Structure formats: structure tokens, C-alpha cells
Image: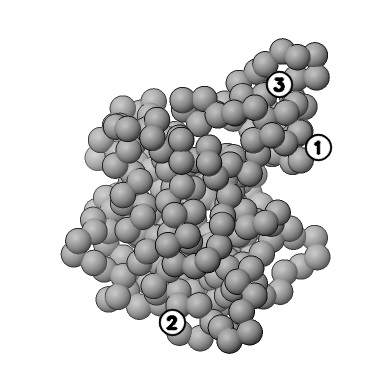
Amino acid sequence: MIPLDASALNDSALPWHVKVLDEVGSTSDWLKQNAATLPVGSVVFAESQTAGRGRRDNRWIAPRGKDLMFSLLLQPDAPLEKWPRITTLAALAICKAIEEELPLHPRIKWPNDVYLTDRKVSGLLAETVSTRDGMRIILGIGLNVNARDFPPDIHATSLLRELASPVVSELDRNALAHRLLASLHTEFRCLDGEFSAAIAEVRERSWLIGRQIRARAPQGEIFGRVLDLNEEGHLILEFPDGSSHTLTSADEIRQA
């Protein structure tokens, strides 16, 4: 196992201040606890998380030293109503980083997951926190890199598992992490700019377009076919009666 190296990840060409912890409950919780004293752009990685979590407080389980688990402290200059775009841009950044490093073809499962084939390889969770310097975003990211075995009830995979190479036994997490941080920086520039171009790229990588889905939305369970994404990256659904609906948020989405 090659450990993560903060000195290799702190690149003067990027705006991030990177710290690597050996073990932490949750990188996002650690940033929440220290947000008031940390500079914007702080990024914390952990070799091991004892209380990693995703949406709906689901646990994010990862073996020590195998994957990438990290969180970023952000304070975008864009208006608050545009901050939800962060998750979409981060998912796109993850896809591009994987594509640039490996011969794999990730897809985005709106709103918070990245898939390889039909299994989850990455998840995101964005939360807001209030500090004396204003509102900030904590973006937590988990990416399965070198893990090979997953519990049967967890529909997940890893980069190494999907690569299926007889000669590669471990992927370089430092190289992947650096590529991710560069990709995130690039995509976040679209937050208050050419977001339509980003949505076009997200559309090309959508795992959901054309599929029949069931979604647990604020108004209850919704069933329909995903037709497209709108200008903000929300799902446009066609209901069985032929009517359409724009889904702006959902706690759970599964293929029908």
C-alpha cells in the first residue's frame, strides 16, 4: 500500500490546502468542526474513516489505505442560488479525472453518484455550514480505487476491479488524487459562467437518460422515464400518462 502524500498533493498551481489524516470519523465532520479556523480551499484526506457517510446518513465503508476519501471546504463567489451546481460539477470532474487516468467510462447517476457499468464507484455529499465569515460548503467525496471485495448487499465497484488488469495490482492514489483536485478546480470555474457547456458534458455521461426510474422525492414516490436534463442539470421525466415533470431533488433513485 502506497500512502497518500500531502506534499505530492499540495500543488502551487492549484488553490487547495491539502492535509492527510491517518484516521478520522468523517472528513466532512472534521472540516465542520474546524471550518471557522481553516482557509477556504482546505482539503482533508483520510486513510481510514470510522464514520464515513453518504446521503440519508448511509455509511460509506472503505478499507484502510485502499480508496480516496476526502472533503473540501468551499466558499464560492457565485450567488447562493447557484451553489447547488457544485454537486453536478464535482460529478463531472470525477468522471473526467477517471477518463484522463484510466481506460474507463464513468457515468453520472443524478444527483450524487458516479457509476462504472451498473455499479457505484463514487459518491458525493454537499453540506452548508455557517461560520463568522459567512456560509461555506463542505463537499465530501468517496472514490473506490483499489478495493476488490464488497459486501453482497452493496452495489459497488472500484477502479481497479473495473480495470480488470492481470498486471496491475494497485493504482496510484496520489496520481488519481492530484488529477481529481485539478479537475475539480477546472470544473468549478463554470459555477457562475458557462454552465450550459458543463451540462452538455454531463448529459453525454448520464447513466439515467432513457431509463425508467422510481424516485423518492419530497412530494412522494415518482415513476417515469428520464428524457433529459434541464439547464440546471435537473431531471426531466415523462410520466406514464405522457405528461412531463422536472425533478429538482430526490432522496433515492432506482431503476424501475
Q: CA distance from mark 2 to mark 1?
A: 41 Å
Q: Is residue 84 visible?
A: yes
Check disc 3 and report the residue beneath it. Answer: 238
**Left or right relative to 130: residue 221:** right
Measured as percent of width and height from the top left, residue 233 is found at 50, 31
Identified at 75% across, 14% down, the residue is 242
Return the disc, 3 or 2, that comes first in the chain's sequence.
2
- Residue 26 in picture, x, y percent from top left: 51, 61
150 relative to 121 in the view: left or right: right
Q: Is 75 above or below relative to 37?
A: above
Q: Residues within 10 Å of mark 1 (few under 14, many from 20)?
A: few
Q: Is residue 128 visible?
A: no
Give the answer, above or below, for where 228 lies relative to 76. Answer: above
Q: Are marks 3 and 2 in contact (CB under 8 Å)?
A: no
Q: Secondary structure at mark 1?
A: loop
Q: Residue at x 46, y 27 (%)?
A: 232
Position of the C terminus by quadrant: top right
- Mark nearest the camera among 2 and 1 is 1
Q: Marks 3 and 2: which is nearer the front?
A: 3
Q: Residues within 10 Å of mark 2 (few under 14, many from 20)?
A: few
Please provide percent x and percent y for residue 199. Answer: 45, 35
> What's the distance in space between the residues labelled 3 and 1, CA to CA?
13 Å
The residue indicated by pointer 1 is 256
Sequence-first tag of 3 and 1: 3
Secondary structure under the numbered disc 2 in the rendered image? loop
The kind of residue on which mark 2 rests is Pro
Label annotation for residue 3: 2
The amino acid pointed to by label 3 is Glu
Left or right: where 2 falls relative to 39: right
Residue drawn at x 70%, y 54% as measured from the top left: 118
